[in-house]
Image (spheres, grey):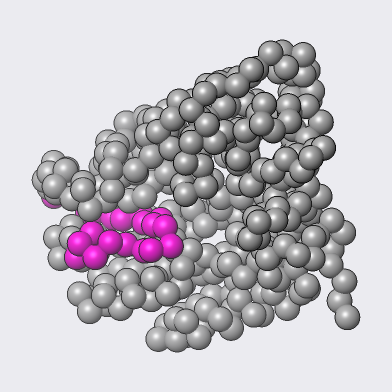
Amino acid sequence: MKKLPIGCNEKCRACAHRWMTHEESEKQKEAWLKQSLHQWSHLINPILSPAPEQRWGYRNKVSLAAQWNSSDWVFGMKVKDEIISLKECPIHSERVRLTLSWLEQYLPPFPLFPLSIYVQAGRQGTLILKTHETPDLNWLKYKQEALAQIGLEGLWLHMHPSAGRRLFGRGPWQLLWGKPRSYNELGLIYGPTAFQQLIPDLYARSLDEAEAFLSPKEKEGVIDLYCGSGASLKRWIGKGCHTVGVETSAEAIESAGSNAPGALLLRGTCSQRIPQLAQWIETIEGYERLAYLNPPRTGIESDVRQWLALNARPSRIAYLSCSAGTLGRDLLYMEKEGYKIKHITPYDFFPNTYHVETLACLSLK
């Protein structure tokens, strides 16, 4: 019988592939993709994986439930009424593990400190409190020395009385310590609510592939939907392209403005911004149009998919997907409207889990 990696909690429901070898995990992911995307199985490239040493300790982005157990804080996964401790999880980065140890050591007990969730995005941490009222924070000024040493750069307090239904709410934010923004390994600025791929150099390889396929040239137009903090936008701006990005998060839009100055940024859902996108296309009349898409698991909204295929008509599309199911749905629609799937490359952004992302490259016939 195979043993769990050191630090794994056997009650944890995450990381389904932690029992497998690297080769077994890759083989299962590739087989699943070829089944899920069977119409294009002959176009699926071999999976691209991180180096062996990057398969553990890579998670710098966590959202952990917090619970006071009579004498100490426990951080981890909530299963029914129990918190499964993930303090020693081998998937977590050293920075995350050290921060959890700091929190366990110094946070005041419940109910003096009604902590519900702890979120860490890279070097930015957020304490989400299930209350309207700001608790006493005098304890913090005597406990800050170790924060910089463990690699944290900002620690926030977010008041969210309904914490649990949604991760973040409309309650106030307060920077308790440090600075409000950090830079990631790709040199991009981000804040405490940022989404970012967990293995930066593998993500950079996916952007390299997308850029090579799109082959953007000066003054051509690039439509970048679900643009996040601007990692892809920075590429197109660097090539001298006319560039528009759409994202729902105010923080992401702010960061994208710093990371890709010169891009037109539209805040809202892609569906809401179709009229502005259509107006933008009119301003680049005569130039080739390209598209880069990185949607959530729900894939591209139906009206956005229709607008892309029938109105925007980019000559080439690079589509990074985290759901083979919605990717297959979207590819079938695009094929029906005249696009040809050129190739699909899987990326193992989440080692030891069943998750796998794919970059699909499409062009007009």
Horizontal relation, residue 173 to residue 64: left or right: left
Q: Position of residue 343 (x, y in %)?
A: 44, 73
Residue at image point 81% right, 31% down: 105
Q: Quadrant of residue 178?
A: top right
Q: Position of residue 262 (x, y in %)?
A: 32, 31
Relative to 256, is 313 above or below? below
Residue at image point 62% right, 70% down: 354
Q: Position of residue 332 (x, y in %)?
A: 30, 78
Q: Nearer the viewer, residue 361 or 122?
A: 122
Q: In the rendered structure, does residue 54 fall within the stretch colored magenta?
A: no
Residue span colored magenta: 286-306
Q: Quadrant of residue 68?
A: top right
- Residue 51 is at least partly visible in this image: no
Residue at image point 43% right, 37% down: 169
Q: Nearer the viewer, residue 201 or 3?
A: 3
- Residue 105 is at least partly visible in this image: yes
Horizontal relation, residue 125 to residue 37: left or right: right
Q: Position of residue 4 (x, y in %)?
A: 84, 67
Horizontal relation, residue 324 to residue 1: left or right: left
